C-alpha cells in the first residue's frame, strides 16, 4: 500500500491462513486498518497518544463485550504511526460483507460504527482497565480527545464514496 495515497477509512490490510495444530485445516484471520487520519499529512497531525490509549481501552471493552462478535476478536490496538488502530478478526472478512444477518451489527463496518458510537457517547468517569494493576500507563488517557477522534472517524464511515470523493473501504491503487 502506498501511504502517500491512503485516506481515512476501514480497510482490509491482509488475510492470513493459520494451520490448526493437530488438524488438517487452516483458518483465516483478517486484519483491518481503521485509518482515522491520513498518514504523513501536512494538514492532519498524528493522533494524540492519550486519545489512542483511551480508544484502545474503550474499543477493546466494547469489542469483547459484543456477545455476537467477541469470539471473532483476536486483537485491537493502536497503529504505531498514530493514524488509527488495527482490528484482527477470525474469518475471511470484508468491511461491508454480511457476516450474520441475525447479529446486531451484521457487518464489520457496522461493528466499527457501533464502537465509534460507544466511544463518542462514553460518559463514565472511569476508563475500563485503567488502574495501576491493569494498565502500564494508566494515567495517560484523554476521553475528550478520544471522543473527538471517533466523531470524525464515524463521519467518514457513514458518508458515501460520492460525498468523500474516494472509497473508504478499498485501499487506493
Image (cartoon, helix red, strand yellow):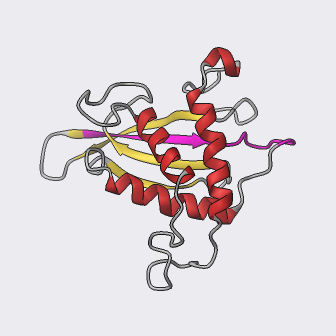
Q: Is residue 168 magenta?
A: no
Q: Which residue extends farthest right? A: 42
Quarter-of-image position of residue 140: bottom right
4 to 73, vertically: above or below: above
In the displayed image of the protein, which residue is found farthest to the left?
23
Q: Quadrant of residue 4?
A: top right
Q: Is 40 located above or below residue 156 in the figure?
A: below
* Residue beneath the point at 43% across and 58% down: 60
Q: Which residue is drawn at the image coordinates 63% and 44% (left, top)?
A: 151
Quadrant in which the N terminus is drawn: top right
Across and down, in percent, residue 172 comes to 64, 24
Q: Position of residue 31 (x, y in %)?
A: 45, 42
Which one is in front, 70 or 150? 150
Left or right: where 62 falls relative to 53 = left
Quadrant of the drawing holding the C terminus: top right
- Seen in the image, is 124 located left or right of residue 93? right
Rendered view: 173 above or below 24: above
Residue 104 drawn at (x, y percent): 31, 37
Q: Residue at x 73, y 42 (%)?
A: 39
Q: Residue at x 47, y 55 (%)?
A: 59
Apparent side of residue 14 relative to residue 27 in the rendered image (left or right): right
Please provide the residue range marked out in magenta. 27-43
Q: Outermost residue, bottom direction? A: 132
Amino acid at each position: 500500500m502506498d501511504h502517500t495515497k491512503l485516506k481515512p477509512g476501514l480497510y482490509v490490510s491482509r488475510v492470513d491462513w493459520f494451520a490448526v495444530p493437530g488438524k488438517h485445516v487452516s483458518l483465516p484471520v483478517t486484519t483491518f486498518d481503521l485509518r482515522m487520519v491520513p498518514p504523513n499529512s501536512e494538514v492532519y497531525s498524528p493522533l494524540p497518544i492519550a486519545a489512542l490509549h483511551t480508544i484502545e481501552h474503550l474499543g477493546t471493552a466494547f469489542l469483547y463485550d459484543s456477545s455476537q462478535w467477541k469470539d471473532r476478536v483476536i486483537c485491537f490496538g493502536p497503529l504505531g504511526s498514530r493514524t488509527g488502530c488495527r482490528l484482527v478478526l477470525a474469518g475471511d472478512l470484508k468491511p461491508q460483507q454480511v457476516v450474520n444477518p441475525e447479529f446486531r451489527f451484521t457487518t464489520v463496518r457496522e461493528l466499527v460504527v457501533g464502537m465509534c458510537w460507544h466511544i463518542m457517547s462514553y460518559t463514565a468517569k472511569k476508563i475500563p482497565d485503567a488502574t495501576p494493576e491493569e494498565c502500564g500507563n494508566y494515567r495517560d488517557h484523554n476521553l475528550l480527545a478520544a471522543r473527538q477522534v471517533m466523531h470524525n472517524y464515524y463521519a467518514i464511515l457513514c458518508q458515501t464514496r460520492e460525498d468523500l470523493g474516494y472509497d473508504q473501504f478499498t485501499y487506493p491503487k
